[in-house]
Amino acid sequence: MMLRLQSSPPWTSPQVSRLNRISSSKRKSVPCDCWWIQSSALPANKFLMHNRGKCKASLQRTLDKSYSPTYLDGSNAGCFKEDLKNGSQGYDAKLMIGSTSYFLLRLTQLYSANRLMKMVQNLLSVVCTFGNGSLPFACMSNSLNKPTPLRLDVSLPSLQDIKWNFSRLIYLFNIRLERNVATSFVVLLVACFSFVVIGGLLLFKFRDNTQSLEDCFWEAWACLISSSTHLKQRTHIGRVIGFVLAIWGILFYSRLLSTMTEQFRNNMQKLREGAQMQVMEADHIVICGINSHLTFILKQLNKYHEFAVRLGTATARRQRILLLSDLPRKQMDKLADNIAKDLSHIDVLTKSCSSLSLTKSFERAAADKARAIIILPANGDRYEVDTDAFLSVLALQPISKMTSVPTIVEVTNSQTAELLKSISGLKVEPVENVASKLLVQCSRQKGLIKIYKHLLNYRKNVFNLFSFPNLAGIKYRQLRRGFEGAVVCGLYRNGKIYFHPNDDEVLWQTDKVLFVGPVPGKREPQIAYPDVKEETNTIQNLEVLEKNGGASHYALDLIKMRVENIVKRPTKPGSKASDWSLGPKECVLLIGWRQDVVEMIEEYDNYLGPGSVLEILSDVPLDDRNRASNFAGHGKVKNIQVSHRVGNPMNYDTLREAILNIRSSFKKGESVPLSIVVISDRECLLGDPSRADKHSAYSLLLAENICNKLGVKVQNLVAEIVDSKLGKQITRIKPSLTYIAAEEVMGLVTAQVAENSELNEVWKDILNAEGDEIYVKDIRLYMKPGENPSFSELAERAHLRQEVAIGYVKNNKKVINPIPKSEPLSLEMTDSIIVISELEGAQPIVM
């Protein structure tokens, strides 16, 4: 057998390692390694890898059985013993024969399995080729369309990739830390407890279980929180561990302190910004937005609360005002400090929000618990103003319990006001910004602006609406004559104001009386009932008429008709000059230009008569003026002639030429009143009001100087000035000049409506050309020379002219709501009377 093996050619495919020589005592653990058999077939390689361990076990069992004494006969045992005695050569040969036989058998099995796998692969290839066009997965076995196998990179990442991943981790942590500073606090706590656990385990291991695990944890914690604890360690390992824990404890507490400080600073910053803070207030006033009216509104609210504290109607010593805007909190605080530093009866709180058109902003401002909400436009463009106001009102609608909170909104036109009132679920009171109309009224009547300020000052006589349910059933004549400390102006019924009710009109229980007088507070105004019969009243009126020289049968019939019927107003709005009393013919030089000049032109056309001239001087190009006029979409004027002149109004020659040109437009010898009105530029007014005031004051003084040099008589020299201090200073130096703070008056009106929303109807009627206005009329229309009538008598005569007398002007000093009213007045024919009337001029006693 050995000769055959030696004579056969060498076989190198299955390489088997040579068995080491072993002794008889270690025969049971003879190692047998199976080497890797190279093959082109992948299943065969897998098969060998799977059966490598089985080969070892099978070979071991075969050898054990072949050389075990149980399976050896006597001769074989003797031979075997002889071989062991003589040497290991025979043993090696037999072992080689057994190994070779086993591997030959296994190779035969592997060859058969390899052939079977090839046959299956060929069969699958034929089937895949046959159904290549129809099978959805045919490309998987097609050699041409065979997809490229995935070449996954399972190598270790490079150092650059590791750095990038580490930087990415730090980046994500910084983002989380930026959003919430408390993340650093959580990381520090996790790291702290990790060091305690690791340090306790190391101490427990190196002390050979001499201490309990709990004591080791506690000692690690002590080293962490107290750096001197590690000095008590006695072993080298313990000192190293304690030193590391002490260093980490110092770093931990320093970082913890800085994190808590940063968290506190972050919270304080959020409180300063106020965007996320919920306001916990009640009975406060919310002012949304910032514009030029804010200063006057805050001053008016301060005066009102001061007066309320004196009357005992205030619920707190100081009224809380919440200023809500999308401006930065620091800017709002600076503005509020500058305005409210001298206001001792209000507390101004500021809150910044992302937008005034979001419901969440008003919810955080506790709008449902507010006393009133004032929405101020922050943009100068009229359409953007109305759009922002509309969105803010819509944001209030989803909030519950808003029906009892009055919402005062400043708008630019009546159409927007009607649209806002149509929103259900809200108590909206739109205040139309009629600053341009107010400017026209005050520029034509000297001293009218002072009357408006008087009626808006809570320390003086103001408009009041008061309910008298115990007086229900009496006639308006008795009510009108019954007040001694106030002037009755009309009735407020079903949300509308009536300035001229019928004397026989009966007072309803739900009606409110409109009167001019001090704020009544908790006490009702005292009223005295004159016991006068109807016939006596008619005789008294006839006697008044006879004194004025008008006792005729026609007049008597008109008086009886007026007593029986309520005064009816013209149904269509038009010029304030009626068919029987045309408006006055005047000449107006308007210096300056802004977008609402178009509305001012219409307002002048309502008050002036035919043949009036209005000339506009400004450095704004004519194309821009025409564009503004076309954009406004207003109709053509009827009574005035409008002309434009381009030039700088602060230039002496330009202004002089304009004054001469407007005077030459009339016939020589014709006496036509001339008024010069200086208005502020809108951009300067919104950006820097002080700059606009300087331009207006300089142009006004320059125009006055030119008129004095040319000998031109000017009836009114008026300038629009925002700063009241500057305006008072100018009028103190030049008494002939007048300043009009139209923005201030509109701010005062808004504040008064915020305190009493029903007064909105009163001011809307007074400040519009379509309703009743306040006029300063000549006293000669109501008395003859030599008369000394009382104010009650003047009020009766004004009542015959469909007017309400509220005061008089004597020696350029106004007196509103004079007390007592029954004493005779020593008035001159140069004095004036202040009335509320629909028509201007000397109206006859007719309907």
Image (cartoon, grey):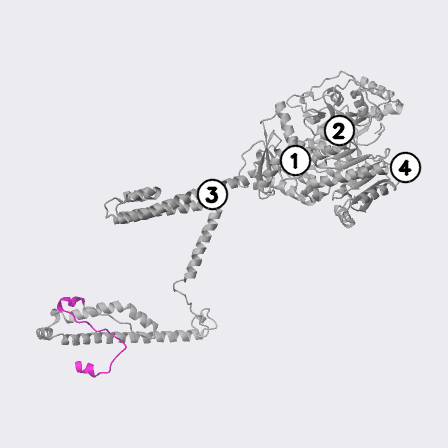
Q: Which residue is mark 2?
A: 499
Is disc 3 placed on a helix, strand or loop?
A: helix
Residue 475 vs 77, above or below: the answer is above
> Marks 2 and 1, how far apart in space?
32 Å
Q: CA distance from mark 3 to mark 1?
A: 37 Å
Q: Which residues are magenta?
A: 1-29
Give the mark nearest the N terminus, 4 or 1: 1
> Which circle marks residue 589 in the picture?
none
Q: Is residue 111 left or right of residue 549?
A: left
Counting residues from the N terminus, which is met first, the one under dot 4 or under dot 3? 3
Is label 3 or label 2 in front?
3
Q: Give the labeled residue for mark 1.
A: 295
Give the quadrant of residue 412.
Answer: top right
Label 4 element class: loop
Task: Specify which label sits upstream in the sequence, 2 or 1.
Answer: 1
In space, the residues marked 2 and 4 are separated at their CA atoms by 38 Å
The amino acid beneath tag 3 is Glu
Callout 2: helix, strand or loop? Answer: loop
Labels 4 & 3 near each other (Cβ < 8 A): no
Amino acid identity at mark 1: Thr
Q: Amino acid at mark 4?
A: Glu
Alpha carbon separation for disc pair 4 and 1: 45 Å
| Mark pair 3, 2: CA separation | 64 Å
The N terminus lies in quadrant? bottom left
- Please rate how many residues cluster around mark 3, counting C-alpha atoms within 10 Å: few if below 14, some from 14 to 19, many from 20: some
Instruction: Identify the residue under disc 3.
Output: 262
User: Any magenta on residue 25?
Assistant: yes
Residue 20 in the image: state x and y as whole percent. Answer: 19, 71
